[in-house]
Amino acid sequence: MRRVCLTLPTHRACPGTIRAVAEEAAHGARHFGVEVHLLILDSSAPPVLAEHRRTVAALPRVPGVTVHHLDEAAQRSFLRETIVRSGAPEPERLLGLMLPSRVSYGACTNRAFLFAEALGCASTHRRDSDSRYQHLDGEPVFPLHHELTALGRPAAEVAGLVSRSRLDPASAHRPVALVGGSFVGEMSVDVEEIHRLDPLVYEDVIGLSVPDGHPEIWRGNLIAEAFRGAGTAAFTGDLTTLTTVSPTRVDMCNIALAREVYGRVPLPPATDTIGSDYFLLHLVHDALLPGVLHNRHIVNFHTDERRSDSGFLAYQLRFAKFLLSAPHLHSVYAGTRAAGDSLLDTGGGLRASAVAALVRESTRLDPLESAERLDVVDRSYRKLGGRYAEAADFLAARRERLVDEVREDMAEFALLIDSWADLVHEAASGGVA
């Protein structure tokens, strides 16, 4: 029986989301006859972790669904054993990249990938703790439905199952590697506030995320569409497109990847950096691998913590590191776009060595560009005043460290890519206790 991993990484209270994702797992098992492993990777504080344990214990038992709720101690034990068995150099350093003490969107998903391998799953389907499902006629609209319909099947077969196809016929023989949708509802609360306070400042700051060299009209469109997901329109019916999926059209709370993708290349384990977990979406797109874009968008919302002063500063740090890392990532993406499907080996899998080489090359960029980006953020935030001026002070006190960190993040990512194949092999052969 086909096994799939539906994963929910979390570090905050989300009992409602746990129950909702469990319903999605049950939908997948009932309608597709698959074995769904619901994997909750929990880094929450003890009181929240205890609440989650009670929530999981109260979930109804569903044939075909197995729930794994793992705290950080259990995750660390599995990772340590896997790393040691792999024989990789610097095992403690690797463990730190897989389970860092700070928030890492890439690392939490990398852990899910290894657990999915250990569970014998053919794909990983990721959701987030701050999301809900849309409804139609009183019933939840689950993205898993489209993911299980298309993922892993030859694109030529899937062409008859979607609303429309925009895929180059040259890729029709390849299996669907990615299925994804976006979110509807609130855009990022802090970014929205910047736009409301001063649209020109918003353009200056968000413009730092756009690669250099884009024509001005394209640049303006990218800035206008950034952080907005699929807007606010309610779901009224399915629309699916077979295509090479643009990373700007999907969100990591609503994504599924075939193991042939993440079994070759992991995500950047950068800490305190939003957007770092979108790396594989760029690889899939640039390697011309087929995907399905759907409109079962997830409803975005923000927890109370995100609206607090501490939550604001935490986001500003992660946002700043995202802007600082952009030149490094854009350098890699320029290389992957130029490589196209030469990123694939003769078996159609991603060539990890080619990706690692591009990542290493990006560490040679002049750090002055990152420093100049911080200058733009500093000027812009001081113009906004209030808590943004306080955020400017917060970032200025960490200026040199942040510039150094983004370069080191890329170097450590290359190290992880080098060891990834061995980690995946050992996870698959060792299983989960």
Image (tube, grey):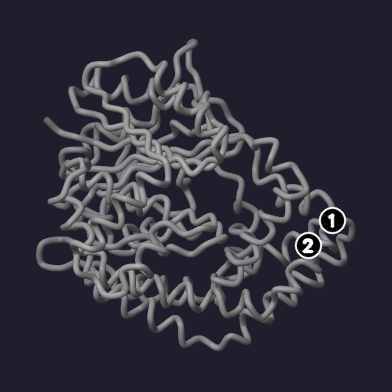
Q: Circle 2 sits in a helix, a strand or a loop, which is it? A: helix
What kind of residue is marked 1? Arg
Residue at 70% across / 48% down in the picture?
311
| Image coords of residue 260 (percent x, y) | 20, 53
Instruction: Give whichever of 365, 76 is nearer the camera.
Output: 76
Farthest residue in the top direction? Answer: 138
Q: How far apart are marks 2 and 1 (CA)?
A: 6 Å
Q: Give the tally of numbered discs.
A: 2
| Image coords of residue 145 (percent x, y) | 32, 28
- Residue 293 in view here: no
Q: Which residue is tagged 1?
A: 387
How packed mark 2 is, by other alpha carbons closer than 10 Å (few <14, some 14-19, many 20 or more), is: many
Q: Which residue is tagged 2?
A: 391
Instruction: Give whichever of 223, 327 is nearer the camera.
Output: 327
Q: In this view, does 4 lie above or below 393?
A: above
Residue at 39% across / 50% down in the picture?
109
What kind of residue is marked 2? Ala
| Image coords of residue 151 (percent x, y) | 24, 40
Tell me, yes or no, whether the two marked residues, 2 and 1, touch with CB atoms within 8 Å: yes
Residue at 26% across / 64% down in the picture?
420
Classify the position of the C terminus by image quarter: top left
